[in-house]
Image (tube, helix red, strand yellow):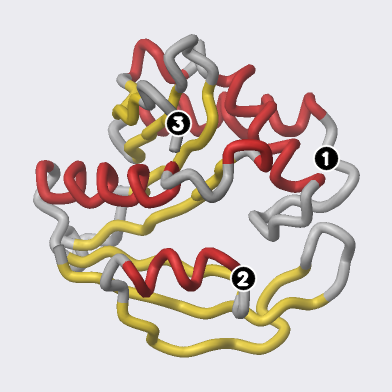
């Protein structure tokens, strides 16, 4: 476990400031084989552009952005909640980009991020959360231990960063 780990929601004024640190985490995860919408090689510029876009979404109130930081303020992980949904789904949000740097894994950070995301969901009046993850990956165990319900899997839904197909499993949770 990481001593003095802080997990918190980043406000609109801070989101852009965190783009650099979040880009480091994203590049690290993709280089480690995480299927999180990006292909290898992932340039720092592309990662920064992604996080700047996320910051704009946070500023518009479309996303909630959470980070896990160590006592020195180093970002070790992050997760997002996409709150902007169609008119007939105001009660739902999508969990996206659960990322923990490779050197910080297996220390409870992802579990703390998910618990914090669920709390933010409740604060925002979201009662149904959905997410997807690579079938057979470590994240499946995390979500199932946290009470997420498996809906099903779609073969060849996405690509791994190296271009290989991967199956994706979908989950939901009522909070």
- Whichever of callouts 3 and 1 sits on the residue coming sooner in the sequence is 3
What is the secondary structure assignment of the residue under circle 1?
loop
Q: Nearer the viewer, mark 1 or mark 2?
A: 2
- Whichever of callouts 1 and 2 sits on the residue coming sooner in the sequence is 1
The image's mark for residue 2 is 3
Task: Tell me which residue sits at (48%, 44%) in the image.
Answer: 107
Residue 38, percent from left and from top:
74, 51
User: Viewed as shown, does residue 75 lie left or right of 83?
Assistant: right
Name the residue tied to disc 2. Answer: 137
Task: Tell me which residue sits at (60%, 79%) in the image.
Answer: 135
Q: CA distance from mark 1 to mark 2?
A: 21 Å
- Whichever of callouts 3 and 2 sits on the residue coming sooner in the sequence is 3
User: Is the residue under label 2 in contact with that under label 3 (CB below 8 Å)?
Assistant: no
User: Viewed as shown, does residue 54 lie left or right of 137?
Assistant: left
Task: Tell me which residue sits at (20%, 66%) in the image.
Answer: 128
The image's mark for residue 42 is 1
């Amino acid at each position: 476990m990481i001593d003095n780990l802080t997990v918190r929601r980043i406000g609109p004024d801070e989101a852009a400031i965190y783009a650099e640190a979040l880009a480091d985490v994203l590049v690290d995860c993709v280089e480690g084989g995480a299927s999180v919408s990006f292909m290898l090689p992932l340039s720092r510029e592309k990662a920064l552009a992604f996080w700047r876009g996320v910051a704009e979404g946070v500023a518009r109130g479309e996303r909630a952005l959470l980070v896990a930081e160590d006592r020195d303020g180093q970002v070790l992980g992050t997760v997002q909640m996409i709150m902007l949904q169609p008119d007939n789904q105001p009660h739902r949000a999508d969990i996206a980009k659960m990322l923990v740097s490779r050197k910080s894994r297996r220390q409870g950070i992802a579990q703390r991020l998910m618990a914090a995301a669920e709390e933010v969901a409740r604060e925002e009046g979201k009662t149904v959360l959905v997410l997807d993850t690579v079938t057979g990956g470590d994240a499946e165990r995390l979500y199932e231990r946290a009470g997420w319900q498996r809906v099903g899997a779609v073969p060849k839904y996405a690509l791994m960063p190296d271009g290989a197909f991967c199956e994706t499993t979908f989950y939901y949770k009522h909070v």
